[in-house]
Image (cartoon, rainbow, N blue to C red):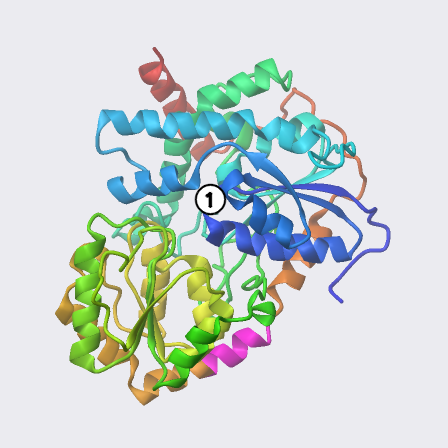
Amino acid sequence: MAYYNQSIPKLKIAMLVVGTRGDVQPFLAVAKRLQEYGHNVRLATHSHFRGFVKSAGVEFYPLGGDPRVFIGYLSRNKGLIPSAPGEICVLHKQAKAIVDSLLPACTEPNIVTGEPFMAQAIIANPAAYGHALAEALGVPLHILFTIPWTPTYAFPHPLARVPQSAGYWLSYIFVDLLIWWGVRGFINDLRKNKLHLAPIATYFDTYHVSISHLPTSYMWSSHILPKPNDWGPLVDVVGYCFLNLGSKYEPPQEFVRWMEKGDKPIYIGFGSMLLEDSKKVAAIILEALRITGQRGIIDRGWGDLGSTHTDMPEDVLLLSDCPHDWLFPQCSAIVHHGGAGTTATGLKAGCPMTIVPYFGDQFLWGERIYQKGLGPAPIPISQLTVQSLSEAITFMLQPQVKNRAMELAELIQREDGVGAAVEAFHRHLPTELPMQKPSSHKDETPNPVQWLFSRIGKLCCLICSP
């Protein structure tokens, strides 16, 4: 069993998760393990995932916001920066809905049983903005995430793909400020009107530099992306956190018969990504499979890929809602969007892979897969063609690529990311619980970098204020 200090009390823990299923699923795995230690865990996320969370035996509480709307925004704008004035309103509506639901998620009774709940600790991803809640309630906050968010000189922020290494560290500050300027009004309204805290004049006056001052656990394997040397002792790279849904999955008999008809297929799916022209993408996939002589599984996903094709070949199967940890070991290779969860499951299954990134961290994982020799260079969705996909499939089917994938899979299978995440949470808890609420008086003198960005933040707030 993972490290556990017997003096740690059984806590009521609010887990706040904003994002897609790929964000929610590893949190759910950690939530289940925390429950094994006797903690009372509530996972608060979008209503879209209510059934998913409850089916795992974890208390669900709804957060505002719709992950489909947010993914649509990111897909259209290829990242956070809006491409048109109307897009700003989309983000503002989503941000307000999320922020307005944070306090109830940490303090309201169980929505099914009515049992009282008051968070004694918060675990959140950065997009959930658990800072203000932790400050108001006087409870510890632990950041848990699948994407690098702590500033480093080793690589750029995934949402700001800076080409020059000199800008890597600053890219994290840029993204942090960009997000803060978009949500600061909602956060300050929450602080003043519901949490009875002073509003934040500038982000760095209160939260310093990004999340560097908070205990943070990153859920990926160090065999794929080692912890940078400039991340301090508050940061852990714990390993992938698997929920292991496949152990209880019973596939339909029609699916089993199709799998038994021939060689292992190529899996192709883009998860929660939305497609501008799903018919065109499906046609590219079908032609590439025909040219390479491969059987294929097309996962419909949120983009409804392949659903418009009525003349699907017999050696291609349309699929939806199948656990990847059951499916991927039965595939020869996989082609996907590069989401952290899909990448992790494919690596554990020993699958060579081609990543077709849309935005954000998908490019990072695509580059890491290429650098490790586990697949070809990533193919951005805008550059996906019959030729590029055919060449990628041919690359993945090389025996040496499969051998490298299997060697890495053995290393990942030995890791216990869920246990390491729970251990890190316990290790970073303060020695005294409950914590004293922080004084409003600040003795710290900001370092020059903090001072500079504090001034920039104040200037931008003045410019952006109505």
In magenta segment, residue 408: yes
Q: In terms of secondary structure, where does tag 1 sit?
A: loop
Which residue is rendered at x = 82% and y = 49% of the image? Answer: 8
Viewer-proximal residue, 402 or 134? 402
Compared to 395, does 251 lie above or below?
above
The N terminus - image quarter: bottom right
Residue 354 pos. (x, y %): 30, 69
Q: Is residue 378 visible?
A: yes
What kind of residue is marked 1?
A: Gly
Compared to 452, does 274 lie above or below?
below
Q: Quadrant of residue 121?
A: top right
Which residue is rendered at x = 65% and y = 20% of the image? Answer: 441
Residue 226 pos. (x, y %): 48, 65
Compared to 376, does 173 lie above or below?
above
Q: Outermost residue, top direction? A: 466
The C terminus - image quarter: top left
Q: Quadrant of residue 101?
A: top right
Viewer-proximal residue, 286 or 371? 286
Which residue is rendered at x = 64% and y = 28% of the image? Answer: 104
Q: Is residue 225 visible?
A: no
Compared to 50, does 178 lie above or below?
above
- Residue marked by disc 1: 19
Which residue is rendered at x = 31% and y = 51% of the image? Answer: 303
Q: Which residues are magenta?
A: 407-415
Q: Is residue 151 left or right of residue 89?
A: right
Residue 340 pos. (x, y %): 44, 58
Residue 406 pos. (x, y %): 45, 82
